Amino acid sequence: MQDKFLKPYNPQETESRIYKMWEESGFFNPDNLPTRHKEKYSIMMPPANVTGMLHMGHALTMTIEDIMIRYQRMRGKKTLWLPGTDHAAIATQSKVEKIIKKEEDKSRYDLGREELLKRIDAFAKQSHDTIISQLRTLGSSCDWSREAFTMDEKRNFAVRTMFKKMYDDGLIYRGKRIINWDPKGQTTISDDEIVYEERSAKFYTFKYSKDFPISISTTRPETKVGDTAVAVHPEDARYQKYIGKEYDAVFCGVPIHIKIIADKEVDKDFGTGALGVTPAHSMIDWEMGQKNNLPIVQVIDEKARMIVGDERIIGKKVTEAREIIVEWLKSEGLLEKEEEIKQNISTAERTGGIIEPLPKLQWFIAVNKPFKIPHSEIAGVQSGSTTTLKEIMRNTVEKGQINIIPDYFNKTYFHWIDNLRDWCISRQLWYGHRIPVWYKGKEVFCNTEAPEGEGWTQDEDTLDTWFSAGLWTFSTLGWPEKTEDFEMYHPTDVLETAYDILFFWVARMIMMTTYALGTVPFNNVYLHGMIRNSKGQKVSKSLGDNVDPADISKKSGTDAMRMALIIGNTPGTDCKWSDDKLKGYKNFANKIWNITRFILESTKDAKYNNEFNNFSEMDKKLIEERNAFVTDITLDMEEFRFYMAGEKIYHYIWHTLADVILEDSKKVFNEGNEEFNNSRKQFLLGTLKTVLIVLHPFMPFLTEEIWQSTNEDKSILMIEKWPI
RNA sequence: GGCCGAUUAGUCUAAUGGCAGAACUUCUCGUUUACACCGAGAGAGCGAAGGUUCGAUUCCUUCAUCGGCCACCA
């Protein structure tokens, strides 16, 4: 027995040494696995944003995925776990912009595109290195030789290829639409990047002018200079006689022309039951404008300043203009009511800017437009048939081709798809994949490469970060090239991630993959919950209570952290982080260490014999019990119940093996019956092997360390065969 | 407003149409002989009401409370 077993288990001394040994073995790379590993098993690691460092949520992701991969590897699968990082366009750019603002008091326009990108690249590189080292600390058995970045050259080529393909199929188009404009970040953002904040606001009721027949209500009087209609409910008796009529008015010095229209969207009982329609600055009004052929009058610019009116309002910020107009309404005696109401206001997730809806020329993906799919393995969608992106996305889950765990997220997914509108993919950011479209006069050219000849300028915009993330399962495998990796590992087996990015990412991957390849990107989606702090609150930087996985790992060992994260954590359910739990599993690590010590001491004169079959009746029973335990947890592993398997393994080791079997063994050895002694020694040696194997996916470092220290044959536990 | 969850012991968390199972905590006892990072034992729990059923913590309905997602009222 080695001397180290005389002291408590020391994870700090062990973990980095073991990780290095694994890496040097080459077995993270499926190409190097022994020949018994034939059938593939693949997981694409969710690429972490290069915006800083990993938090406990990432640690949970890595733990679950590493458990899946290690389990499947031991079961003899050819396992590929492909790691990577995400450029996270808006998140990274706004983070770096904030730092530059703080440290140098400069904006991105002061630096210019080239310099800003240089700074972002440097920041991203540093984040990347931090992240990679954290992933190693967590014990992730991923294939570093295949590491990818969402914006490296290969991924960029995949993005351009995809854009071109969708453009040619008419699924990507450029159009003037109302978009969510973030005046602070100076970019468009998607619906998903909006967060609503409840604030109190003033709700004004007034007439445009003294002789205007209908009063309207709004929280934004300043936009009324862009009104081109008043909408009322078609069945509203009060206003029937006005429908179709047109009026002229001068509103705070701005001449406006208003048509009275009828629209079912209008709520008779809200406000005055009449709605001033501003097609240029409201999503709903825009749609009414389209239906009724209303003129669009833009009155606010990208900096959220007024661009019409006389010297009273022109050039003023919208909030200032609002006050001025309210004063004007009062002085003219037009204001009828002023109420305090609660209002949800849209803000940009990353910058906190208040969203200003603006009509702008942007690129979109058409989700409802029919197209012909040449090749399809999607259930319910024939090769060569006509379909829509929405329809294929729905089918994959509806027909069971993609299995979401837990299954109640199916409903959430369908609900989202059914309400999905065209996806705005262009961003006025500098950090990201540049849109592969070039202009010369009225000519437009889209291709993966720039056009020949002089005078072409490329579109200034970049793509939404989720565009490249949507290609992740196959761009990482070399697509559009027909690589061996792609043939072997796609579709992937599981996509494991937190449920909060089901729409952002999972749905987008399904969209892009089904469209481009006619296959699903993965067969299973395992959604884990959020890690909350001990009070049950969402962990956030502003609370200053985000725990660094590296610290925990240093203090208590990665294995203990992994157990604390995984046990009691069911899919889709949030989980509280608890230091007590961590302590419990740290103790568990030492318990196993001492179990090993006891077994080694009491079997000093014996050697494990695989062929031994002269077991006592008592030990035969124990073997049966052990086999039943292994069968049971194997089923849990197969059915994604890792929280359950982990708990059962813990229980078997501590309360069956240690408390019952080892205690009983002391008696057996004291009694000195040689036959019984030999039987028990073989049983204990065999059981130690078994529990090390089944515990390995959960506590890889400790189990590998014991395995290496107790086996003379230099075998590596990581690729040992699962016992059944 | 629409949708989706949740409510189990002091805490945290499972399973289940047939005695509700762990972990931590608490209490009692033991033991320094693999491990005090120990052992043996004890205690304590299904939010409320109704329904289906031989039987409901589980299925259904309603209510209460909490959480989340989506839409957004102009």
Image (tube, rainbow, N blue to C red):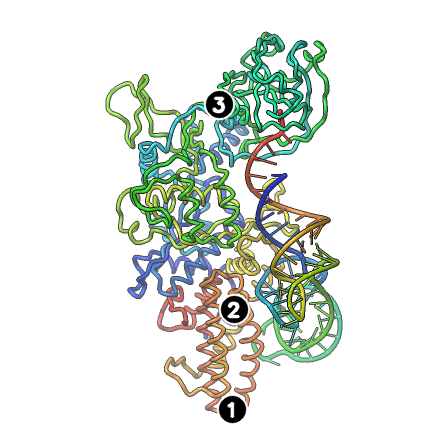
Q: Nearer the viewer, mark 1 or mark 3?
A: 3
Residue A320 found in image quarter: top right
* Residue A583, position as x, y percentages in the image: 60, 61
| Image x and y of residue A340, in percent | 72, 26
Label of residue A649 in the image: 2
* Residue A290: assigned label: 3
Q: Say what secondary structure mark 3 lies in.
A: helix
Q: Chain of mark 1?
A: A
| Residue found at x 38% / y 29% | A173
**Is A397 displayed left or right of A643 in the figure?**
left
The secondary element bearing badge 1 is classed as loop
Residue ID at (48%, 76%): A626
Extreme residue toward the left, this view: A452
Mark 2 lies on a secondary structure that is: helix
The quarter of the displayed image where residue A66 is located: bottom left
Q: Are marks 1 and 3 in contact (CB under 8 Å)?
A: no
Question: What amino acid is labelled 2 in the image?
Answer: Ile
- Amino acid type at circle 3 is Gln
Q: CA distance from mark 1 to mark 2?
A: 31 Å
Q: Nearer the viewer, residue B31 or A33?
A: A33
Q: Residues within 10 Å of mark 2 (few under 14, many from 20)?
A: some
Kindly indicate the quadrant of the structure image that contains residue A494.
bottom left
Q: Earlier in the sequence, mark 1 or mark 2?
A: 2
Q: Is residue A114 above or below residue B52?
A: above
